[in-house]
Amino acid sequence: MADCGVLQVMEDVDADFPAFVTQHAGLVWTVLVRGCGLPWHDADDCAQETFIRAYEALRRYPVQRRRELQARPWLTTIALNIVRNTERSRKRRAEVPLPDDIITLASDDVGATLDSADLTDRLAGLAERYRVPIVLRHVHGMSYAEIAAALELPSGTVKAQVSRGLALLRENLRTEVSA
Amino acid sequence: MTALSGLRVEPPDGFVDRVLDRVGLVDEWVLLDGPIGPLCVAFSTRGVSLVRLGADAEEFEAAFRRRLGRPVRRAVSVPGGIERALRTGRAPRELSFDLSGLTDFAREVLTVTASIPPGEIRSYGWVAREIGRPGAVRAVGTALGHNPVPVLIPCHRVVRGDGRIGDYAFGPAAKRSLLQAEGLDPDEMERLADRGVRFVGSDTSRIFCCPTCRDARRIGLAHRREFASEAAARAAGYRPCARCRPAA
């Protein structure tokens, strides 16, 4: 698989970083837009921030640590932390609690117009605890072990979330068809 | 749920560039006067990354992106070492090169090539032997053909084993002009090679050299001896010059 999870050995961070960003930008964007339901411009900010943090960390890490890094779970963790932190500071500013789970995609999102709008909406309607694992598993083909590492959850929990999330998606489908 | 794989989000155009810009990894480029006309030179804090003959900005930026896969923008200032290197034909020690996208082999080839002084030529075989891979003559030619930083790393100073000046990424005429600009007469070098001369020696020192070696050019006509091969020179009791280390 071309998009393998293991970081290509970064002997020279500055030299390899451009290819690293190119290779993994899609994953980070998908996690942010589909997984976290961020609107396009917020996703852009968070995705940039994710790679900037990744770069700073890679520069700091000894080469052995870079060799052992699993790029996809690692980047996913960074992205999710950034979203959590920005949401927290936004909440503090606004002093109104945001709904925990459901952040709906604005219908004018560029992403939404690019692909199957139905499925996008159905996925966006799921709670984030199902959405993120489903995106990682079924949009990006990550293994359960990788997802467990990314979300810092036991692998069993991740499997349960994925299958429960898929069941909910299918249920939505049936409801719509019968309606 | 295979349909889900269609929900992959592609980053917008320019996203990678914006990230690289923010972490300070964007190269800059500048148009300079080279020995035979304008040159575009790109560099970053890591060193010179791309050199192209000619003055076409659009073409250069496209070539940069094609080759290095990252953005480049116009420079505000030029590192001093680059202009000095163009003036003297020799890269000063503080001038570094960003050869990070290349194989170890290509890097070794270019490092050895960088040591050939202005106004002198060596053969592909010479480079191959210098890097300890005497059989890799063709691979040396390929590596030099893909030299990302021509002129500054003088791949134009490497010629064919039979003495012909040979090909160049920017055309054989440009190669000859570059050598002429350094005071070498390519026609004369080819005539010498056509007479079967590969090395010249001095019968006073009994040392043999590449014909363009600085020491070889000081040999008085009365003492100058010509050799068709390294073996012939050695058989005549000559030892190789320590400066140019003559080899096929």
Image (cartoon, helix red, strand yellow):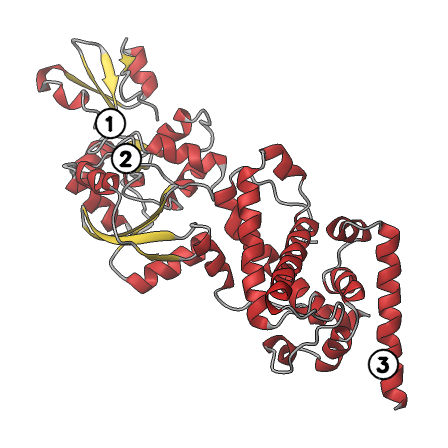
Q: Position of residue A108 (x, y in %)?
A: 60, 82
The answer to which of marks 1 and 2 sits earlier in the sequence is: 2
Answer left or right for B12 relative to B144.
right
Q: Position of residue B44 (x, y in %)?
A: 37, 46
**Can you identify the residue that label 2 sits on?**
B163
Same subunit, labels 1 and 2: the answer reads yes
Query: Do tag 1 and tag 2 residues touch (Cβ < 8 Å)?
Result: yes
Q: Quadrant of the C terminus of chain A?
A: bottom right
Q: Position of residue B14 (x, y in %)?
A: 48, 65
Same subunit, labels 1 and 3: the answer reads no
The disc labelled 1 sits on which kind of residue?
Val
Residue under the image location 37 percent in, 30 percent down: B127
> Between B235 and A62, which is closer to the camera in this rendering?
A62
Per the model, the C-alpha gap separating discs 3 and 2 is 76 Å
What chain does badge 2 belong to?
B
Per the model, the C-alpha gap separating discs 1 and 2 is 9 Å
Q: Nearer the viewer, mark 1 or mark 3?
A: 3
In terms of image quadrants, where is residue A136?
Answer: bottom right
Per the model, the C-alpha gap separating discs 1 and 3 is 84 Å
Residue under the image location 71 percent in, 73 percent down: A103
Q: For the residue labelled by badge 2, is the local secondary structure a helix, a strand or a loop?
A: loop
Q: Quadrant of the N terminus of chain A?
A: bottom right
Residue under the image location 18 percent in, 49 percent down: B36
**Can you identify the residue that label 3 sits on?**
A173
**Can you identify the residue that label 1 sits on?**
B197
